[in-house]
Amino acid sequence: MPTTIKDVAAAAGVSVGTASKALNGLGRMREDTRARVLAAARQLGFRPNPLAQGLLAGRTFTVGLVSSDSFGRFSIPVMLGAEDALGAGQISVFMCDTRDDPIRERHYIERLLARRVEGIIVTGRRTEPRAGIGQNLPVPVVYAMTQSVDERDLSIIPDDRGGGEQAARHLLATGREKIGHITGPERFQAARLRAQGLRDVVEPAGEVLFGEWSEEWGRQGADILLRAVPDVEAIFCGSDQIARGVAETLRERGRRVPDDVALVGFDNWEPMALACRPPLTTIDMSLGDIGRMAAEHLLNVMAGQPAESGVRTVPAGLVIRESTRVAQLP
């Protein structure tokens, strides 16, 4: 059986309360008493419970994660990344789903603060600027995969524009020059930035087609693009869902992927990208890295470092699969 604080107290000839104070450096007592307790703990191999020590020091070793992403598509990878960073400090994460309801969000924040969490990560399913959860909170706050309109806050988001540039450079490197772009609604910052990233590197073949974040729009957009640019050599899509719809239409029109048309998506949502025929080359938003950076910021502030502010972007990564294989010579 593991050694308990009662065993240490008995070996040192003191009460449990005195042993606890000696081990945690608390209270006033004779130095020889403190030394006797510490010696007994070493001899017995006693290891203090970190949670109990934390409670004595006024800590709870918990962080709250407040998300508006009901499906967990983006928030779960962010949370896993945060847990990787927090795990080294043995800090747990409470996840709360607000369902895009401001009243529910405020309720969860109040509950988390009542539980004395040591920090809060606010995340979501889109990077659109949103109202912050407030200044003068008793704990540090960081926004991850979402962006606070308050420039005093720290927001960590994916590099959508850089991801569009990577997709364009990859397609050019495979020998494709006539590149079309089918993406989500123009009102979304992510759609605009991904399209701009493509334009920074190459002039898209025809106009950028803005629509919806869906497979159905991918099918419709592919039909529109093929009519406008019949000899298109590659299509960069604003999401993996759109790309999967594009792949279906290309197949129905007798256009082989990647031999006739190369295809790149965005998100690296593996259930979608790997189910695509053929498996989809795509841009990974590095959501785990975003979560880790958010958690590291909280740890730094909790350790006494100054809080950061502004917007930081995390580089995206290119995941190459079969849909952009170099075309075979006839």
Image: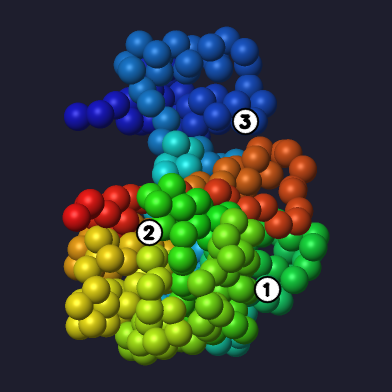
Q: Secondary structure at mark 1?
A: strand
Quarter of the picture containing the C terminus is: bottom left
Q: Residue at x 78, y 68 (%)?
A: 150
261 left or right of 138 in image: left
Q: Residues within 10 Å of mark 2 (few under 14, many from 20)?
A: many
Q: Is residue 280 visible?
A: no
Tell me the kind of residue under disc 3.
Answer: Leu
Q: Residues within 10 Å of mark 3 (few under 14, many from 20)?
A: few
Residue at 23% from the left image edge and 51% from the top image edge? 329
Which amino acid is tagged 2? Thr
Which residue is rendered at x = 67% and y = 76% of the image?
130
Mark found first going from the N terminus, 3 or 1: 3
Which residue is identified by label 3? 26
Question: Mark 1 is on which residue type?
Answer: Pro
How far apart marks 3 and 2 lie (CA) works out to 56 Å
Cα–Cα span, label 1 and label 2: 25 Å
Whether tag 3 and tag 1 are in contact, CB under 8 A, the answer is no
* Residue denoted by label 1: 129
3D distance between C-alphas at marks 3 and 1: 46 Å
